[in-house]
Image: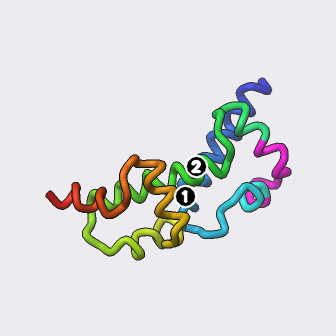
Amino acid sequence: MNRHKNSNIIDEIQDKIKENCADKNLSLNFLAHMMDKSPAYIGRLFKEKTNRSVSEYILFVRMEKLRDLLDTTTQPANVLLEQVGLEKNNYFYTLFKKHFGVPLSSYKQKNME
């Protein structure tokens, strides 16, 4: 019973992250407030079940959604970043390269060929 309940909570967290990924306020505290649970509880449960922190999963969802947009649209990167809740700054470029293994400029060029 408890395992099934926890699984439902994880599914709900993942769904809320996917639905709200464009919201720059999306965070563990934001989700906990939405779900009327404590941040510590949600954070611990999510990490136990997925081996990722909530913030790692939020970043993963945002990066994957960004990849989909980069692959399917010609809009400028700053417009796409806003659609996935990310800010265009030096830290973003570091995260992008870490996630995809190439800089954003190389990724965009590769997709234009």
Rendered residue at 32%/61% (across/down): 70
Residue 107 is left or right of residue 66, and the answer is: left
Callout 2 touching callout 1 (CB < 8 Å): yes
Which mark, residue 19? 1
Residue 67 in the magenta stretch? The answer is no
Residue on which disc 2 sits: 15
Q: Quadrant of residue 25?
A: bottom right
Question: Which residue is the extreme one toward the left?
Answer: 113
Q: Quadrant of the C terminus?
A: bottom left
Residue 65 location in percent, x, y?
43, 56
Q: Residues within 10 Å of mark 1 (few under 14, many from 20)?
A: few
Residue 92 location in percent, x, y?
51, 64
Q: Residues within 10 Å of mark 2 (few under 14, many from 20)?
A: few
Circle 2 sits in a helix, a strand or a loop, which is it?
A: helix
Rendered residue at 36%/52% (across/down): 102
Residue 6 is left or right of residue 60, and the answer is: right
Residue type, mark 1 in image? Glu
Rendered residue at 61%/54% (across/down): 16
Circle 1 sits in a helix, a strand or a loop, which is it?
A: helix
Give the spatial CA distance, label 2 vs label 1.
6 Å
Q: How many marks?
A: 2
Residue 12 location in percent, x, y?
65, 45
Residue 51 location in percent, x, y?
65, 33
Rendered residue at 33%/75% (across/down): 76
Bounds of the magenta segment: 33-43
- Establish if 1 lies above or below 100: above
Residue type, mark 2 in image? Asp
Q: Quadrant of the N terminus?
A: top right
Which mark, residue 92? none
- Establish if 94 lies above or below 14: below
- Establish if 7 lies above or below 16: above
Magenta segment's dominant SS is helix
